[in-house]
Image (cartoon, grey):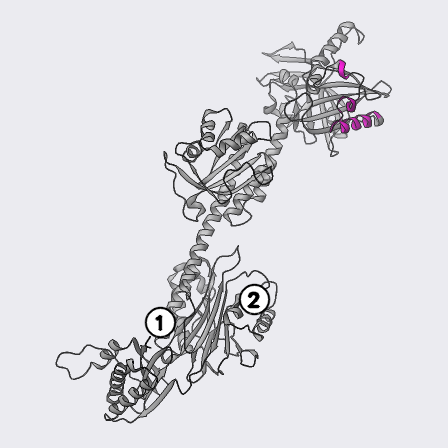
Amino acid sequence: MDSEHVASGGKVPTPVPEDSAVVVDARGSVMVWSAGATQLLGYEPEEIVGRHATDLLAADLPASARRHIAEGRQWATEVALRHREGGRVVVRLRGAPLVDAARRRLWLVTGAALTNPAGPSDPDAAAMWGRTLAQLPLPVAVYGLDARLMAANEVMTRVMGRTEEEMRGLTLWEIEPSWPFDEYDRLQREVLRTGEMIFHEQHGQAPGETREHAWSMFLSPLKDENGTVHGLSATVFDTTEQYWARQRLAVLNDASLRIGSTLDVTRTAEELAEVAVTGFADFVTVDLLESVAQGEEPRSVPPGESVTVRRAAQRSVLKGCPESVVASGGTSLYPADSLPVLALVSGRGNRHRSDDPALRAWVESSPARAATVGKYMIHSVMMVPLRARGVTLGMVHFLRHRTPESFGEDDLLLAEEIVARAAVSVDNARRYTHERRTALALQRSLLPERPPALTAVEVAYRYLPAGSGADVGGDWLDVIQLSGARVALVVGDVVGHGIQASATMGRLRTAVRTLADVDLAPDELLTQLDDLVIRLDREEGPEARGRAEETSGEVGATCLYAVYDPASRRCTMARAGHPPPALVTADGTVRFLDLPAGPPLGLGGLPYESTEVELGEGSLLALYTDGLVEAADRDIGVGLELLRRALSSPADTLEETCDQVLSTALTSRPADDVVLLLARTSALDARQMRTWHLPLDPAAVAGARKVAGEQVAAWGLDETAFATELIVSELVTNAIRYGEAPIRLRLIRGSTLICEVSDGSSTAPHLRRARVFDEGGRGLLLVAQVAERWGSRQTPTGKTIWAEQPLPA
């Protein structure tokens, strides 16, 4: 190769080393940079590999060379290159087209032989050429037509672990009868047969090496001036650094695709461990701080204190992770001032070899850890804190025992990069889990803890949160005991998900209970509830009000409210945009009640209508939310038919029937919350209820007191006789004095003893504290003190004042 180095305006002849060799891909990027190229231009391989070859040009390539390159033909030309120190180097280069295993074009750029006036047969030139091949810092070998080795330079003999004399005259398969040398032998014979050069890449351990390398091999035919093949040459480039760089990029790409696929903390930790073991480590553990593992907010790691962690995930190249001293899900303690604690406090990763005193101290702090390190010959460790948004979440350990190389600085950078990416996903999953758990706890706290014991109905219910990947919704149910042994059944669904929906659900449930206490009719109750939802929407602020104006009102919730009276066996119901209830009669017939739909709560200005249905004793009412019958992959009609089928043959108990309905109607994990409320009705017979009509005459008080005392005695409730007579006396007196005809007295024996006095006046009674000299005003106060609870309700003909007493044990 001829070259001239130009500096300070003059040209100084500079002999170019014959070992200058560069491999360039089809896009012009440098793939391989030899030591001779470094000697020529001063650049180290890591400075050049990956850069475009035109970055080295100090002048454009001649047109002929550019044309030959475009046509994929060999070329030779003089070209001016840039030296690393800023000088200009004129070099005569040769370019030979290559093709890699994927049939992509490469270029091998080398220096041309020095022009020698003495001719190629000159002994000195031949000697120099021989020394160049022998001392070339690349493995080079020459093979004859029979693929037997003729010559090999010093580097090749070192790689093969044999002298040239030991290998001469042998094929590669005879030299090393093992994989991948059988493949190399096959490729050599293909070159000899076709006369075409082959480029091959291989990663593995050569016989004379102690660790694996990545090799790029050029198997080139040796031809005479007539093109006849007389043998072949093998030139090998060590591309280990480029190989590991590609591997690291692949690991990062794998991490981007695989980590964070779910909003589950444990699964995210497992994905991190799987990516690392697949990519560059032999054993990986992911430990989370105990507070993080419990779903709480992360706590800072104080220096000088021990830290408790929980093993969230671990993976190994060995089946079953035998290297582990802590099972998945188990806890362990990082002693104060140990390597993991120091890394957690500093927030920076570190790497250590087995001979590091600090690592040895950490290993020996646990006999089990020391035993497994010795047994599996763990020789290299990295500890990288799991941090996201400035908060430490845990620690990731990377270990090697099967890979012979220790972790390097590039490995630490790679580990920190994938851990940082995983930490964000872990934190997102932790935040989601925390919010979901909070919303679920809030929602469950607002649901009835257990079905209440009621005279009117027997109830059972199920609440099923939405599947993973969706937030907790605002579905709710309630069973409210009303006066007169009546019961209110409520099922509702707040639009939206998360804590906000659960909080809104809690406010609506409280409002329904408050309105039920005033004994509002179902249609009136829904009207009041509609106003409340509108007010809640306005309280969200100007932005929410703006959205409401744009959409002509936000749909806040749906609700079904039903009141069942066991005395009349009639059920009054109204619904606000909610699915209709199902009724199962005593003979097993299932029908969906045709109630006026009513608008969803929150629209405002539209009326609700009540419907009254007579229920036979033993009838079964099914109230539910839309999550039970609606699904993305089916029509609602299909869901209703599945519900009908499940209810047509109810199980022996309501609890079993609930499970039967869910298993039949839910063909897949629900995407929305599901609430199911089943109520089997009862009726009050003549033995449980007595009614007397009284005249509007003060003398009727004594008679009412007398018949009430006789009735409770007949029921065997003598202990309640005095309190009952007192309540009857005061309520009847109050009705005669302040009310209007007709007056009715009714006693009901259910889960409690109920006393009711009705009159034709709609004026509500008032409890007040009488003054010392007042002649009246103490009646209701006495009733309130004697009864367990009391109240009044409006009726179509007036009002009813009632009082309840617990039954004797």
- Magenta residues span 165-192
Do labels 2 and 1 touch, CB within 8 Å?
A: no
Disc number for residue 630: 2
Q: Is residue 415 above or below residue 426?
A: above
Viewer-side residue, 85 vs 308: 308
Q: What residue is drawn where x is 71% and y is 22%?
A: 236
Q: Is residue 657 above or below residue 703?
A: above
- Circle 2 — which element? loop
The amino acid marked with disc number 2 is Glu
Viewer-side residue, 778 vs 1: 778
Q: Quadrant of the N terminus?
A: top right
Q: Residues within 10 Å of mark 2 (few under 14, many from 20)?
A: many
Q: Is residue 30 above or below residue 15?
A: below
Q: Residues within 10 Å of mark 1 (few under 14, many from 20)?
A: few
Magenta stretch: includes residue 315: no
Upstream in sequence: badge 2 or badge 1: 1
Q: Which residue is mark 1?
A: 514
Percent from the top left, x then y, of residue 713?
31, 85
Answer with left or right where residue 534 lies relative to residue 240.
left
Q: What residue is drawn where x is 51% and y is 56%?
A: 470
Q: Main secondary structure of the magenta part?
A: helix
